[in-house]
Image (cartoon, helix red, strand yellow):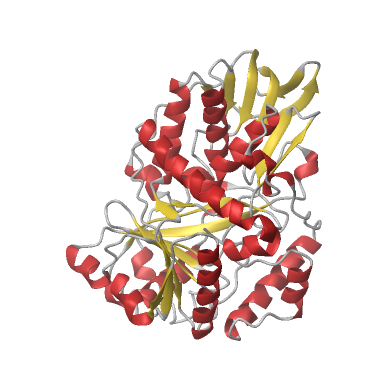
Amino acid sequence: MTSFLPARRHVRAPVSPTVSPAFSHLDALADAIPKPYWTDARPWPEPRSALTADTTCDLVIIGGGYTGLWAALQAKEADPSLDVVLIEADTCGAAASGRNGGFCASSLTHGILNGVERFADEMPELEAQGLANLDEIEKSIARYGIDCDFQRSGELHVATEPWQVDELARSARLAASLGHDVQLLSAEETRREVNSPTYLGALAMPRGVAMLDPARLVWGLREACLRHGVRIHEWTKALAVTEARHGIEVRTPYGRIGAARGVLATNGFPPLLRRLKNYIVPVYDYVLVTEPLSDAQLASIGWQGRQGIGDSANQFHYYRLTEDNRILWGGYDAIYYYGGPVRSDLTLRADTYAVLADHFFETFPQLEGIRFTHRWGGVIDMCSRFCPFVGTAMGGRLGYALGFTGLGVGATRYAAGALVDRLYGRNTERSRSNLMNSKPLPLPPEPFRWLGIQLTRWSLSRADENAGQRNLWLRTLDKVGLGFDS
């Protein structure tokens, strides 16, 4: 879970760590290696060979993250006779699917408030379908024996400023009206769950989120696809997709793939369809992970429910415990770079790690002295409505699913399934939903895109400093359907 619009917390402003004594926790970063914890903790599966010859298939899938793997798996579950080929430019899970925080949410709309703003009439059905989708993910993990530390532990949305307490009450009323099991907690009750002096209250949603190891989920889905007969080729970059006489053709460095149908599942990478270039932008999110907590350190926090946690600022942090009792701490300072480049060097950002470390010890001062072992970042495919969309091209033979905006661990299964349903003409609840039959507003070209995002960052900073009051710019964005409320 993350937002692409970095604002500032009410009590602090960004200061260069090279000149300010405010950053007193840099020593905690000294040994943090620039690598995702998830892929460092367990060995990668043996890679699949690259495609080195021309081939044909019924369905070709471009992208080996959650969206592509769920599309392949659900296509084979629906019709085991389909010949499915999946290609991945790197290895499955090397990008966002293996780098995220492992929050698997039932929400399909990046939160209830964002959904109500955009799909008010459909929200009862979307929330029910989202909970059913999370149930199906849990069943699939059990069915295929995927060892990914799946825990249906729920989530705490915590308030750290007085104005956020009222916002949580509004969210609780909406969530309850949409069928969720919710509980509003006082400051004291919240601190009994997780002990931080910054907490003023919380909204607990015990069934709406599961925590998991994201890389092991990718690898488990990959193995399930292989067992179903999906032909996976890693280290195989799609260079172009074109229409062909009986379907589509995908060109790769060493061979071409002819297919009746195809799926684009490329997340924040430049899309192979020109029509999509103004619908998504790549935004970078950054994460730290601590060393394992001692028994005494863990006792000082509590956290026996092992819930995922997100604070309620416009620019929020998300954090959780790992299987070996480390704390993953991410979010807040998500960055859009001018022109939307996707480069590996941009997944590391020293200034952001310094800010995150400072905020971590403000939230958990009792952990003073703990060290971070891992630091990394990844690309989010942000769209203007902050939740996924699907569509087709080339006469309905090529489909795409994009725009997850940092909340795709659960929603990818739903969107991939809806897209496969559409490609094969199946009339289902998810393929009929307005969410899956509408698109976000396109984003403006540069330099207006960058300028708009920077103005929004500044405006959200001011909102956090003024008890959530939104200025004229933010109110205008809300009016035209470009505001964000998660």
Tally of numbered discs: 0
Query: Does residue 368 appear in this view?
Result: no
Residue 14 spot, x, y in % from top left: 54, 77
Indicate left or right for 159 with 365 as reference: right
Residue 41 spot, x, y in % from top left: 33, 44
Indicate left or right for 381 with 97 as reference: right
Q: Which residue is drawn at 70% across and 50% down?
A: 280
Q: Residue at x 33, y 40 (%)?
A: 42
Residue 400 spot, x, y in % from top left: 68, 37
Q: Residue at x 56, y 61 (%)?
A: 111
Q: Which of 222 and 26 is in front in this view?
A: 222
Query: On screen, 122 above or below 171?
Result: above
Specify the quadrant of the image occupied by residue 112.
bottom right
The C terminus lies in which quarter of the figure?
bottom right
Query: On screen, 169 above or below 287?
Result: below
Q: Nearer the viewer, residue 226 or 108?
A: 108
Residue 477 spot, x, y in % from top left: 75, 69
Query: On screen, 208 above or below 171?
Result: above
Q: Which of 142 and 102 is in front in this view?
A: 142
Specify the quadrant of the image occupied by residue 209.
bottom left
Q: Residue furthest left?
A: 296
Q: Which of 460 and 32 is in front in this view?
A: 460
Query: Does residue 146 appear in this view?
Result: yes
Indicate left or right for 193 with 319 as reference: left
